[in-house]
């Protein structure tokens, strides 16, 4: 039996960022899905209550854009120029950290658990982007 070190490869910062955004999206999706099981949630939705107040075209567009950005960052992290990618990851990583910090108070434990994971992941996005290696 060989007991040597395992061979590993160095993963480029772009792939790390893309993977972190994908992980963040999974946490968002599961948080929203589990939220449907909170008693009264579906009835509230049927009655027109949205995530930030009454449902209307504007709040749904704003919510759609807010949730589209992390999904788009999966691709942007791989495809956009390095300088733009770095700054977008820092900016949006911190922005989504703030969103989670603001939405967690008073939430159910499943949401707080996923929210804590999302905070760690979104901060990791900003840190990885900040430490982007120079030539």
Image (spheres, rainbow, N blue to C red):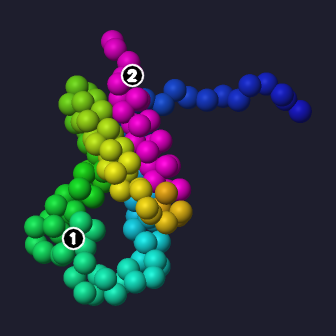
Q: Residue at x 47, y 72 (%)?
A: 34
Nearer-N-terminus badge (1/2): 1
Q: Residue at x 25, y 73 (%)?
A: 50
Extreme residue in the right direction? 1
Identify the secondary structure beneath mark 2.
loop
Q: Main secondary structure of the magenta part?
A: helix
Residue named by callout 1: 53
Q: Please identify, in this view, whether the residue under mark 1 or under mark 2 is nearer the observer.
A: 1
Residue 119 position (above or below residue 60)? above
* The one of 21 and 94 positioned closer to us in this rendering: 94
Residue 74 position (above or below residue 37)? above
Image-based side of 133 in relation to 82, left or right: right
Residue 20 in percent (x, y) is at 43, 43
Residue 72 in percent (x, y) is at 26, 50
Residue 126 appears in which quarter of the rendering?
A: top left
Residue named by callout 2: 131
Residue 119 position (above or below residue 27)? above
Q: Identify the magenta region.
A: 113-135
Residue 56 appears in which quarter of the rendering?
A: bottom left
Classify 10 Å Cα crowding around label 2: few (below 14), some (14-19), many (20 and above): few
Q: Residue at x 38, y 48 (%)?
A: 101
Residue 27 in percent (x, y) is at 45, 57
Residue 26 appears in which quarter of the rendering?
A: bottom left
Q: Quadrant of the N terminus?
A: top right
| One can see residue 23 in this view | no
């Amino acid at each position: 039996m060989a007991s040597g070190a395992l061979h590993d490869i160095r993963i480029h910062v772009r792939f790390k960022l893309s993977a972190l955004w994908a992980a963040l999206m999974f946490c968002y999706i599961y948080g929203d899905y589990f939220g449907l099981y909170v008693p009264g949630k579906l009835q509230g939705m049927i009655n027109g209550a949205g995530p930030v107040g009454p449902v209307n075209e504007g709040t749904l567009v704003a919510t759609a854009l807010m949730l589209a950005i992390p999904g788009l960052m999966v691709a942007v992290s791989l495809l956009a120029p390095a300088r733009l990618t770095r700054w977008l990851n820092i900016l949006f990583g911190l922005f989504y950290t703030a969103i989670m910090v603001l939405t967690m108070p008073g939430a159910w434990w499943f949401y707080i658990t996923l929210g804590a994971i999302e905070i760690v992941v979104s901060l990791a996005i900003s840190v990885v982007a900040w430490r982007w290696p120079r030539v």
